[in-house]
Image (cartoon, coloured by chain):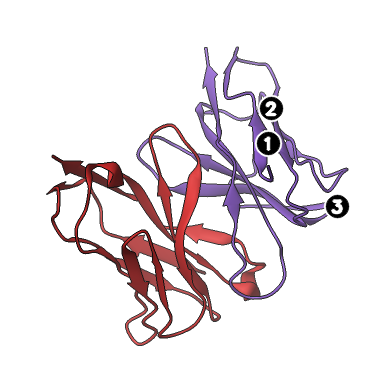
Amino acid sequence: DGGITQSPKYLFRKEGQNVTLSCEQNLNHDAMYWYRQDPGQGLRLIYYSQIVNDFQKGDIAEGYSVSREKKESFPLTVTSAQKNPTAFYLCASSTPTGTGNTIYFGEGSWLTVV
Amino acid sequence: GNSVTQMEGPVTLSEEAFLTINCTYTATGYPSLFWYVQYPGEGLQLLLKATKADDKGSNKGFEATYRKETTSFHLEKGSVQVSDSAVYFCALSDQAAGNKLTFGGGTRVLVKP
């Protein structure tokens, strides 16, 4: 089945460690996105990529890094510089051109700093 | 910049009641508008969308009409079920802003039997 796969579903990180969240899509979408959701709040854009080997910062990129070496994959690294990383992380993808393009989401990854 | 404002929750209803969630937006271009639904512990699912003024999106008994004159996209359902309990997000996508989604803060809906 086509879709977006995020892993792991749950991740615990010790303070000072970097962690990487995986996001893979087989929808043949050009654009991919990472959002952060804090409890009881909306979604905020971390990074997005419209095409392979290119990506742009979103609204809250500090303390995060990404890569886009393959069309299917857009991993997110939460670095030790991110002061408050505990959150629910959502990966998404879409076709970037035209109006009304629909963005599809993965099931999300819960990151907890212990 | 672009922004989306939606009514704060939680909204608590009885089964078969009428649901309305207000959503208004500010955009520099001509956005497409979306409603997403999030069930507990899950990602977001597209509920419906509208791409131009006066379009009506509909799905699973939910409806929303793109009103350019009032910059609104209110979500309605005539008779809710317990299974409609979720968080609902209004969002816009603006081609002038790279088609990134801008979300409202979400509205939690709880339907009681």
Question: What residue is drawn where x is 54% and y is 40%?
Answer: A36
Residue ID for mark 2? A79
Which tag, 3 or 1, sits closer to the chain's start?
3
What residue is disc 1 on? A64
- The residue indicated by pointer 3 is A52
- Whether labels 3 and 1 share one chain: yes
How many numbered markers are drawn?
A: 3
Q: Chain of mark 1?
A: A
Q: Name the quarter where the N terminus of chain A is drawn.
A: top right
Name the element at disc 2: loop
Label 1 secondary element: strand
**The image quarter in which residue A17 lies:** top right
Q: Which chain is red?
A: B
Quick one: label 2, few (<14), some, or many (20+) residues within 10 Å?
Answer: some
Image colour for chain A is purple
Pinpoint residue A54: horizontal percent, then vertical percent. 83, 53
Structural distance between the alpha carbons of marks 3 and 1? 18 Å
Does dot 3 land on a helix, a strand or a loop? Answer: loop
Q: Are dots 2 and 1 in contact, CB under 8 Å?
A: yes
Residue B51 percent location from the top left of the image: 52, 77
Q: Are marks 2 and 1 on the same chain?
A: yes
